[in-house]
Image (cartoon, rainbow, N blue to C red):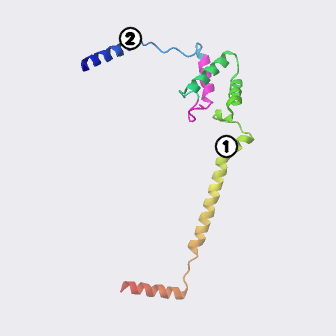
Amino acid sequence: MKRWITFISTLLLATNLVFAGEAAPLAGDEAVEKRMVAISEELRCLVCQNESLAASQADLANDLRREIRKMIAEGKTDQEILDFMVARYGDFVRYRPPVKPTTWVLWGGPFVLLVGGLGALVFFLRRRNRVVAAPVLSEEQRRRAAALLDQSET
């Protein structure tokens, strides 16, 4: 039985190799494909949010790339295509969103956090230096400490 299963599996694999062809290009024009890739690298996949539209294999990414090819074929400029995508999905779809009031936190937030972190660090270090420099023993405290040390040695 194992031999038959192995034989049939090998036969199916061999027929697949025989009928396998070279992958057909997705676009008839190579320049259109390059332009589509350049545009889709600027856009974020809405399903796989850490991947560009060019790298994503999600169905929605395939649909959006097809839409970009269609708009390129219609003669739209790159900026028109990007504007269409932003109008449809918002600034989130762009990897480099424009600087405007709704994205100020996005662009300025890291710098505000950095300045706040440095300020907190300076405050903490100054406070710690004050606490470390403060303990000065009085003469009475020194005598008591010396007495305690003498007791512990004996």
Residue 104 to residue 127: above or below:
above
Name the residue located 63 percent from the left edge and 19 percent from the top edge.
69
Q: Tell me the element at label 1.
A: helix
| Badge number at residue 2 | none
Residue 132 to residue 95: above or below:
below
Name the side, left or right, on which 24 lies relative to 66: left
* Quadrant the N terminus occupies: top left
Residue 37: image location, x then y, percent: 59, 24
* Residue indicated by mark 1: 106
Mark 1 is on which residue type?
A: Leu
Residue 25: image location, x then y, percent: 53, 15
| Residue 49 among those drawn in magenta | yes
Mark 2, other Cα within 10 Å: few <14 / some 14–19 / many ≥20: few
Residue 4: image location, x then y, percent: 27, 16
Q: Tell me the element at label 2.
A: helix
- Magenta range: 31-52
| Badge number at residue 18 | 2
Q: Quadrant of residue 99?
A: top right
Residue 116 to residue 82: above or below:
below
Name the residue located 62 percent from the left edge and 30 percent from the top edge.
43
Mark 2 is on which residue type?
A: Val
